[in-house]
Image (tube, rainbow, N blue to C red):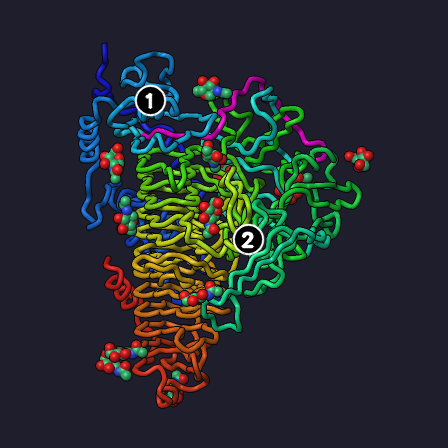
Amino acid sequence: MMTSRTSLLPATPLKLLVTVWLGILSSIQARQWPLRASNKDHVPASFDCEMRKAAYAYGKKLIPRHGKFEALYWALDLKHCNVDLSKDEHGELLTRDGTATSRRHLKRKGHEEIASIPPDAVFVAVDGTDDDVDSGTLSSPFQSLQKAVDYAATHTSSKHVRVREGVFYLNQTLLLTPQHSGLQILAYPGESPTFSGGIPLQIINEWKPYHPPNNKNKTNIWVTSLGNQLDGEMPGLQINGVRSTVARYPNMDGGIEVSCGYGCMIPGNQATWDPPKNANKQKQKVVHYTDSNKTRARPNGGWFEHYTIGVHGPCDVYDPPVSYWCSEHPSGGGAFAFITPSGMTPKDAAVLPNGPYYSDQSMQEDARIFVWRPARWANWMFRVGAYNNQTQHVTFGAGGNQGARGEKQGGDWFIENLLEELDSPNEFYYDPRTHKLYLWYNGTGAPPPDTEMVVPQLRTLVNATGTQWNPVVNITLRGITFRATRYTYMDPHGVPSGGDWALERNGAVFLQGTRQMTLDQCTFERLDSNGVMISGYNRNTTVQNCDFAYIGGTAMASWGYTNETDTDPGRPGVHLQGAPAAGVDGTDGEHPKYNTIQGCTAREVGLYEKQASFYMQAKTAYSTLTGNVFFNGPRAGINFNDGFAGGDELYHNLVFSTCRESGDHGPFNSWDRQPFLTYKDGLEEPTMFSEWRRIHHNFFIDNYSPQENVDNDDGSARFHTHDNFFVYGGQGMKNDFGGCDNWHYRNIYAYVGKAIFSMKQIKGHEDHFFENRVIMTQENVGSFQCDGDGAFVFGNNSYYTASGNVTECKMSLEEWQRHGNDLNSTSSEYPKDDEIIHWAKSLLGF
Ligand SMILES: *[C@@H]1O[C@H](CO)[C@@H](O)[C@H](O)[C@H]1NC(C)=O
Ligand SMILES: *[C@@H]1O[C@H](CO)[C@@H](O)[C@H](O)[C@H]1NC(C)=O
Ligand SMILES: *[C@@H]1O[C@H](CO)[C@@H](O)[C@H](O)[C@H]1NC(C)=O
Ligand SMILES: *[C@@H]1O[C@H](CO)[C@@H](O)[C@H](O)[C@H]1NC(C)=O
Ligand SMILES: *[C@@H]1O[C@H](CO)[C@@H](O)[C@H](O)[C@H]1NC(C)=O
Ligand SMILES: *[C@@H]1O[C@H](CO)[C@@H](O)[C@H](O)[C@H]1NC(C)=O
Ligand SMILES: *[C@@H]1O[C@H](CO)[C@@H](O)[C@H](O)[C@H]1NC(C)=O
Ligand SMILES: *[C@@H]1O[C@H](CO)[C@@H](O)[C@H](O)[C@H]1NC(C)=O
Ligand SMILES: *[C@@H]1O[C@H](CO)[C@@H](O)[C@H](O)[C@H]1NC(C)=O
Ligand SMILES: *[C@@H]1O[C@H](CO)[C@@H](O)[C@H](O)[C@H]1NC(C)=O
Ligand SMILES: *[C@@H]1O[C@H](CO)[C@@H](O)[C@H](O)[C@H]1NC(C)=O
Ligand SMILES: *[C@@H]1O[C@H](CO)[C@@H](O)[C@H](O)[C@H]1NC(C)=O
């Protein structure tokens, strides 16, 4: 007899979620609002608090589902502004216009949704079964997600899958192919299922106390043998849903999930660095594409006018082995060809006080050294190739490919995964040779028997892969939580385009060769690699109402292809035509177009890979980012690695506390060092120019970085940045090294150092700056081309300084205006705090 697939079942309580939430709160509560802007001494404290309160109000308005949005409250450190969280909203959910919706209403909606589940829907539950012929019904659900989606795709007309509450520990990636097109994979109403890439550990042998031989300190270290539960190393460990830290030096008092800022590192000058190995230049091929039809105008003596790349040679560390930085003479700020040091020696024995490491074997097989590129542009991770236990000299083994920019020396660094470094609460070390797990349990005594321990294992949880010609179309994943993928920073990395990034082409959710895919109301949490990877051909990918937190790499990345090499591991079995010169050519459409990222939150990203963002894109066109709240990241908040086709729009986003562990950049950063031939909407013929991009109506706070909210770096061009509220930063606008056509207008810059930093321009591609309100801590409006062809274009600005006076091109404003410049602009003394906040609110509409 056919059983109906739908009926009303009570929703199970969300105990696990509550536990995890408390974990999150405890780890962020401790921090204080940092105002690290170089000009912070000039910022009135009263303004800072009023501004943070406004950011809180705006963030709650953008993400009503978070109610009082505790994480935002703590990240803005509003306690120190005398805002009381408990007095706020009482946990009611707010709608966009600020009216409260009661949870009862949501429950009623859940019931309505149950009634609307189609009769042939397929159900899947952790305690289901895959053998029964009747499997997939509500009363007899499947256990395997793959079986459920396969069955729904082939045996139902509704193509509707409902996932029940519980943690699905996946031992294989859920594969979605073109045959699965049209599927809806949705959480059961009122339930919150989890796809985990982890292995739940079983403690089969009793925990025994472990006393480190040379440590007199009181420790709480326990050891147990796991038998054959793991195949090889232990890539990570999550205890009751929160990460444990790999044993390391220097320690992190708050553990890996709490950013140390610039701390928890050994300074780069505490080691001597071995020179880079000579690259094999035999196979190296450099393309400098000078076809006169494939160039674009740029002001800086020819920089970035032509497409340039190098294949092999120093790029043999990448897969595919290609990068802008492997051409012989790349241009750009601080530019030279890619290299990394080949080893290092600590300056003296005190640098690694717990060394020398007595186990040469674990040193060579387990230990990893993380090295910031000097100036903290990215970090390189190396395995240890060889170790000398007398001098502590380390020869680097595999690695060093996690960033695109090189240096002959290393910057700040740390070492991890050594038993000798297990000396701090919540650190662990696993010896794959003896299967022993050593853990400093952060509590009293041994871990209690009900402790949940999960080892991240799988790299990808969902893989939707088709091709441009046979795509995966129109699949929605809704209400799913993704957790516990393993780290991939030692995996092959590629250089996505001419920016500073290197990246692994992977994520917990991987999309390639798709159309109209939707991730809705999903949670991405404690993934050790990237969250979502939108790779190659994709059209109209939507990520909406999703929350990303505690991500090892980047929350969302989008990365297209051009033919730079004959083969690419991302397109297995395909011979790519025209490489490497066809690298300039994006007309074959093998790239993401029309991504929409809306209503999402992302925070605490880049726990391992430091060149990590909330969203980054390379070789991607026409993206929309709107209504998102992003905070707490090590480097730029949103990164555009190239100009590609352009046409992107960013509006109504709140972004702050970026560059917490690095300098330069800010909430947004772009580079544009390689031109591409691409199609533009509305034009028949492809062109070498990117379509204009718009950044408007955003609330950005540059509270960590000393630079600017929108960092338009090397070659960036064709930006309309307008109607934003930008708080802090060294300068309001930046356009450097070969950038042009940069327009800033109707923005409010609150307490920037100066208004403008812009380099030489060419006629017809000038930068513009008008109708802005600039509250500056210096009197000098900035540096820009004062006269001649390409002179900076401005007017109608309102400048505010402590004295009420400003200077431009070494003249007073009056004198400068008498020469016909910056007409109609005014200067006055600082406005009051509430006046600035009022301007911001009316600009952004809240
Ligand atoms: C994978 O997981 C399924 C469902 O939990 C289980 O039945 C199967 O034995 C596992 N396979 C392997 C290879 O571990
Ligand atoms: C996408 O799939 C849904 C559900 O299967 C269906 O209702 C909808 O019509 C599809 N949309 C398109 C554009 O194919
Ligand atoms: C013992 O603890 C102190 C204080 O935390 C620390 O400075 C010292 O390095 C520790 N000694 C060892 C051998 O771990
Ligand atoms: C250890 O536990 C205490 C109390 O729960 C907590 O405050 C602290 O952050 C934890 N330390 C680490 C490194 O997780
Ligand atoms: C450049 O473009 C012009 C006009 O479209 C065309 O006539 C010419 O052949 C092109 N040159 C090359 C080298 O492709
Ligand atoms: C130090 O290294 C030497 C040479 O590899 C090795 O023979 C010796 O056992 C090591 N010493 C210790 C204490 O591990
Ligand atoms: C996704 O699946 C395709 C097809 O099976 C495979 O070639 C590819 O390696 C997978 N990618 C990832 C990131 O898992
Ligand atoms: C994809 O996005 C573009 C741009 O927003 C839009 O014009 C187009 O209709 C979308 N296509 C589909 C199938 O949704
Ligand atoms: C790249 O290679 C693919 C596969 O051979 C081919 O279909 C495509 O046209 C090539 N693109 C360009 C721009 O040459
Ligand atoms: C200033 O505003 C006036 C009137 O709106 C306008 O005509 C003029 O072009 C503006 N100047 C600049 C440089 O934007
Ligand atoms: C502002 O500039 C005017 C004219 O140059 C000068 O007289 C005045 O003293 C300046 N005010 C301050 C506070 O520096
Ligand atoms: C100055 O601003 C006023 C008022 O907006 C406008 O009428 C006038 O045209 C502007 N003048 C210039 C030279 O931009």
Point 73% across, 38% down: residue: 357
Front residue of 355 and 582: 582
* Magenta part of the chain: 192-216
Question: In the image, what residue occupies the spot 74% across and 41% down?
Answer: 387
Corner quadrant of residue 701: bottom left
Instruction: Tell me if mark 2 has few (under 14), some (14-19) or many (20+) residues whose alpha carbon lies within 10 angstroms of its own.
Output: many
Reply above or below: 374 against 178: below
Magenta span: predominant SS is loop
- Evaluate whether residue 49 shows in this view: no
On the rendered structure, is 722 left or right of 33?
left
Residue beneath disc 1: 151
How many residues crowd around disc 1 within 10 Å: few (fewer than 14), some, or many (20 or more)? Answer: some
On the rendered image, what quadrant is the C terminus found in?
A: bottom left
- Which amino acid type corresponds to the residue marked 1 in the rendered image? Tyr
Above or below, 448 against 410 in this view is: above
User: Which labelled disc corresponds to residue 580?
Assistant: 2
Residue placed most toward the observer, 769 or 53: 769
- 215 within the magenta span: yes
Q: Measured from the top left, where is residue 721 in percent x and y?
A: 35, 65
